[in-house]
Amino acid sequence: MHELGIVFYIIRDVKQAAEEHHVEHVSAVVMNIGEVSTIVPEYLTDCWRWAADKEDLLRGSALKINLVPAVTHCDGCDREYETVRYGRTCPHCNSENTWLLSGREVEIKEIEV
């Protein structure tokens, strides 16, 4: 379960931002998590609860997750499509000349105080 390691990095970054802005308590952290990021949102939330409650700054804070859909762009026909549904091959022109446009994100979107 790599979600616990990710939570430790999130906590590190939130603590650093809080220190820079003289914040004493964080009420929530909002994350953008890509649909194909390999992160299981439920595991991330469980790990957050365990780790955040060990920090005065984060005790009781929520972890809010925005799931970012995986979208692939096809250079063959210049169209976009759902990655999870169709994979690497474009459903419009059958080209494999495609690349992931979104869906791998793992980012802190905002910190609520």
Image (cartoon, helix red, strand yellow):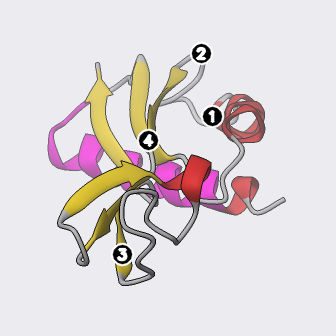
- Pointer 4: residues within 10 angstroms few (<14), some, or many (20+)? some
Which of pointers 3 and 2 lies earlier in the amino acid sequence? 2
Viewer-nearest residue: 53 or 70: 70
Pair 4/1: label in front: 4
Q: Which residue is mark 4?
A: 69
Which mark, residue 52? 1
Range of the magenta residues? 6-23
Front in this rendered view, residue 30 or 8: 30
Report the Cα–Cα distance between label 4 and label 1.
Answer: 27 Å
Q: Position of residue 84 (x, y in %)?
A: 59, 51
User: What numbered label is drawn on residue 99?
Assistant: 3
Q: CA distance from mark 3 to mark 2?
A: 39 Å
Image quarter of the N terminus? bottom right
Label 2, label 1: how far apart the Cα atoms are: 7 Å
Q: Earlier in the sequence, mark 4 or mark 3?
A: 4
Asked whether, in this view, residue 42 is left or right of residue 109, the answer is right
Task: Name the one closer to the observer, 20 or 43.
Answer: 43
* Quadrant of the drawing holding the C terminus: top left
Type of the residue with mark 1? Ala
- Residue carrying label 2: 60
Looking at the image, residue 14 sits to the left or right of residue 44; the answer is left
